Image: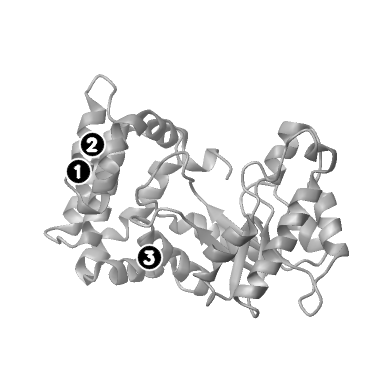
Amino acid sequence: MESFLAHEWNWFRDCDAFQLWFYDPGGCLCARCREDLCAPLLRQVEMARRVVRAASPKARVEISLWPIWAWERRLGKSYGEELLDRLRATPVPKEGLPVLVDSAEGDDAFLEEAHALRFPMRAFLFSTNVETPFAFLHPLPRWTEAMVRRVQDKRLDAGYVHSLFPVSKELATLIGLRTLSQPEVARQDRVRDACRIYLGDRGAASRLAPLLETWEDLLAGPRPDPADARSLAASVDRALGALSTPEADVVRTSIHAVAEILAPLDEPLAPRLSRLLAASPPFRAFAPVAAAEHAALRTFVQTGWNHVHY
């Protein structure tokens, strides 16, 4: 495993930071490891430090606590605070305590506990993950702004927007970057500027920007009205006009995909969604699996992204 990680991380040796995620389930849950749930996590930390030190000696290792809090509930056993204590007891010479990261959403994350122990602490906003599998544009202008306030209120060191899908994340990332770096600028101005950079068309950007808060509300759920999705799709079409760039296609196809996902179930929805994506070069690779994933997509959109804690 260590040689494999060394090979992979060597590709990114110019980065100034690497994050270690224990991910699902936040460690090993076999019968042997359940006796000491922190031990395998600490071994991973030490291995990551060795690999990063060899690949990029000046880079730091950041440690994600996600989703230990979720598994504590499922197991009925606490180990997150013990992990913090053991990490604090073994600081790295010249580096001090490691940077820790956790979700900015919910009260069960370890932001306050870690910060109280003087760990450098960062929070992330994560609106979806690969299991949903929502691969479309998901703008969060107001939610990102609220995350900035939480980071400031909790006096954390930093916050960032975490997104996975390369086809559709650029505009949402730009909005996040503008919000994180320029919180003093009016939200409407930040969103319009992000749209201008992404679309390369000032007029289309000015028309699209006001619609993104409605888009944000639609995906917040629960149970959004299909008529609202169709109306928003028509408004986005008018905002983009004849603009035919790949970026405009991502925006246009994303909102029409949401409208198809929410359409009444007495219609042949899955084939229509597949055809919509097949006609869009940015999303064409997703078309063959769209029908199989339609039920999961519908559940995610109807539930509302912020009703599932990532």
Which amino acid does the dot numbered 2 rest on?
Answer: Ser
Which amino acid does the dot numbered 3 rest on?
Answer: Val
Residue 274: mark in rendering: 2
Q: Which residue is mark 3?
A: 191
* SS for callout 3: helix
Estimate the x, y position of residue 278 in percent, counting from the top left: 19, 43
Tell me which residue sits at (49%, 49%) in the image: 127
Question: The N terminus appears in which quarter of the rendering?
Answer: bottom right
Q: In this rendering, is residue 162 above or below 179?
A: above
Badge 2, how many Cα within 10 Å: few under 14, some, many 20+? many
Badge 3, how many Cα within 10 Å: few under 14, some, many 20+? many
How far apart marks 2 and 1 lie (CA) works out to 6 Å
Estimate the x, y position of residue 40 in percent, counting from the top left: 76, 49
Q: Which residue is mark 1?
A: 278
Q: Is residue 46 left or right of residue 161?
A: right
Q: Are marks 2 and 1 in contact (CB under 8 Å)?
A: yes
Tell me which residue sits at (81%, 50%) in the image: 39
